[in-house]
Image (spheres, grey):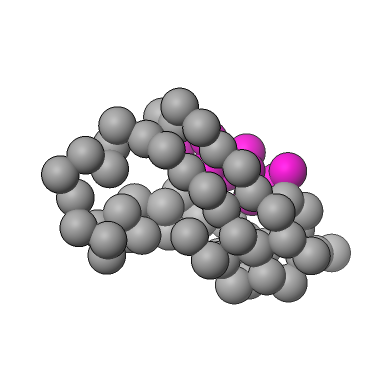
Amino acid sequence: MLPTPELVKSYIAAGLDCSHLEVSGDGAHFEAVIVSEAFAGKRLIQRHQLVYACLLYTSDAADEGLGV
């Protein structure tokens, strides 16, 4: 079963305090638009690491592509 954008969004929202969160995708690849105070002062790679940490323990979403 492929993950849905709603499922990926719920994983991100559970691990990151977001003031804005949009996730779209087809089950194989996803794109996320995320606004979070947690990103303040962080480099791009550090922001990506924060997002991927939200997905790390989810077998479905971590295996799929995510464009952030």
Q: Residue at x 73, y 43 (%)?
A: 6
Q: Main secondary structure of the magenta part?
A: helix
Q: Residue at x 68, y 70 (%)?
A: 29
In which quadrant will I find the N terminus?
bottom right
Taking the magenta stretch, the answer to whether it contains residue 56 is no
Q: Quadrant of residue 44?
A: bottom left
Q: Residue at x 37, y 35 (%)?
A: 36
State the residue in front, 6 or 60: 6
Residue 14 % position (x, y) = 51, 34
Find the magenta span and give its range.
6-16
Look at the image and tell me whether residue 10 can be seen.
yes
Judge from the rendering whether residue 4 lies leftward or rightward of residue 59; answer left or right: right
Judge from the rendering whether residue 8 lies leftward or rightward of residue 25; answer left or right: left
State the residue in front, 57 or 61: 61
Say if 19 sits above or below 38 in the image.
above
Residue 49 % position (x, y) = 32, 59
Q: Quadrant of residue 21?
A: top right
Judge from the rendering whether residue 3 lies leftward or rightward of residue 23; answer left or right: right
Look at the image and tell me whether residue 14 can be seen.
no
Numbered-mark total:
0
Taking the magenta stretch, the answer to whether it contains residue 13 is yes
Say if 33 sits above or below 1 in the image.
above
